[in-house]
Image (cartoon, grey):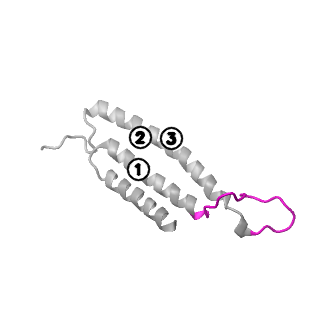
Amino acid sequence: MNLVIALAIGVLFGSGIWLVLRPRTFQVIIGLLLMSYAVNLFIFIMGRLMVDRPPLTLGDGLPDPTALTDPLPQALVLTAIVIGFATTALYLVMMIGSRGVTGTDHVDGRESEE
């Protein structure tokens, strides 16, 4: 399972890097999204992914830390998703404005000579 998750994170991040290096602004935005998803998945997995385990225990005595999941990575990923959505909306508005001003969606502002 760890190998599958590591490969998924690597493919997401690698695809994001490839798209960031593309000449069109929409591809750059999608690349940034893929890289942020890869980082969110990495942070989430570092919190020990467990099924049917409580995040906190309110019982008497000291709880067993191996029986609990860490709620901090879950909270960090949830916050990162919200911030990522807001920045994506900002990027899209800037892309639409730039296309309206320059008439092209290339990162450098001009079409290729091909």
* Cα–Cα span, label 2 and label 1: 10 Å
Give the percent coordinates (x, y) of residue 42: 51, 60
Q: Which residue is mark 3?
A: 86
Answer left or right for 101 relative to 111. Answer: right
Q: What residue do we see at 61% from left, 58% from top?
A: 73
Q: What secondary structure is marked by label 2?
A: helix
Label 3 vs 2, first from the N-terminus: 3
Looking at the rendered structure, the number of numbered marks drawn on it comes to 3
Answer left or right for 111 relative to 57. Answer: left
Q: Which residue is mark 2?
A: 91
Q: Nearer the viewer, residue 29 or 9?
A: 9
Q: Which residue is mark 1?
A: 32
Residue 17 lies in the magenta stretch: no
Answer left or right for 108 relative to 7. Answer: left
Pointer 2 and pointer 1: residues touching (CB < 8 Å)? Answer: yes
Front tag of 2 and 1: 1
Up-down: is 1 above or below 37?
below
Q: Which residue is farthest top?
A: 100
Identify residue type, mark 2: Tyr
Pointer 3 and pointer 2: residues touching (CB < 8 Å)? Answer: no
Q: Please report the bounds of the magenta region as a residue range.
A: 46-64
Our reading of the magenta stretch's main secondary structure is: loop
Q: Which residue is farthest left?
A: 114
Identify residue type, mark 3: Ala
